[in-house]
Image: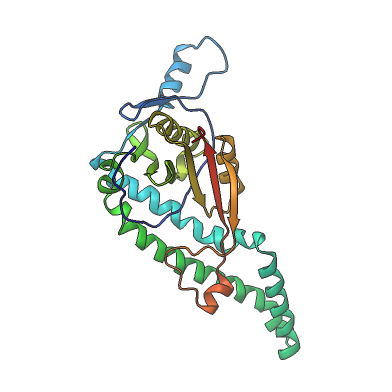
Amino acid sequence: MHFSSPKMVCETKIVADEHDAIPGTKKESMMWSSPPSSAALNPAEAKDVRKDAVFIREFERGDEEEVRRIFYEGIMERIPNTAFRGLRQQPKTQFLYALLTVMCFFMTKSVMLTCCAPLILMGARYYYSRKVILNYLDCALHTDMADIEAYYMKPTGSCFWVAVLNGRVVGIVAAQGREDDNTVELRRMSVDSRYRGKGIAKALGRRVLEFAVRNNYAAVVLGTTAVKLAAHKLYESLGFRQTGQSEDYRLPGMSRSPPERLFFQIRYSRYRLQLREE
């Protein structure tokens, strides 16, 4: 397989909840809807099913505004998740913050200042999380997300899809082929927060898998810094297996300054789904 590779771009993965998808080819649209609980539907139930139908189709130029909005909002959700929820994954950082709080008491002998120390530390985490993630967002919006057609639609072996519900774009995902190891990377998955819980993310993920099979790729890979367990469970439900983890991943936009290293940490996980042996 031969295709032109676009320039390296900022990378992240955002996911939502899981459900079933329907197969399709790269040049086809797909439609998915929640299966009814009974075999027969009355007219009112049939109307509800049609209203819940989600179409997955290739990106079109007119989708740009909604695609960037979904991507932007998904990334912005990571600020509090990384600052607060992500601390649960960093036991060494928890210990360091506890030590700093104790040191504050012994140095100041002030109960009030000691009680304020955790709040100050959490405030610093939020500040640096926001700083790094906004820098990352700026990087992404000036590379592949600035020209989706050039990065994903024109190169052979790559593609970008949108999920559409009632005429509105509600989810996105990309596939970027890699000629060096004959794999395709799942990228840019995000679902509008108002439409989560409908299985849209899983349908988008399966769309990438079908694309990889039809284009004879050996495997699908992805990397994620997602904090929420639901994201990792979604990948596993699609058949991915974790192949590695790093606590020292450098997200585009990071300066790696001492204060940033103290108040911003992420865990980078790599996943792979082997489709066939090389």
Instruction: Where is residue 174? Give x, y as percent.
Output: 38, 42
Total marks shown come to: 0
Chosen colour scheme: rainbow
Q: Is residue 124 visible?
A: no
- 75 is higher (above) or lower (below) than 235: below
Q: Is residue 35 left or right of residue 184?
A: right
Instruction: Where is residue 179? Give x, y as percent.
Output: 37, 44
Q: Residue 51 lies in what quarter of the image?
A: top left
Instruction: Where is residue 115? Give x, y as percent.
Output: 70, 77
As drawn, the residue found furthest toward the front would be 278
- Identify the residue shown where x is 59% and y is 39%: 236
* Residue placed most toward the observer, 228 or 197: 228
- Identify the residue shown where x is 65% and y is 63%: 90
* Residue placed most toward the observer, 163 or 116: 163
Q: Is residue 69 visible?
A: yes
- Identify the residue shown where x is 60% and y is 70%: 122
* Residue placed most toward the observer, 271 or 122: 271
As drawn, the residue found furthest toward the top would be 40
- 55 is higher (above) or lower (below) than 16: above
Instruction: Where is residue 97? Give x, y as percent.
Output: 68, 74
Q: Where is the N terminus found, in terms of image quarters?
A: top left
Q: Is residue 163 left or right of residue 45?
A: left
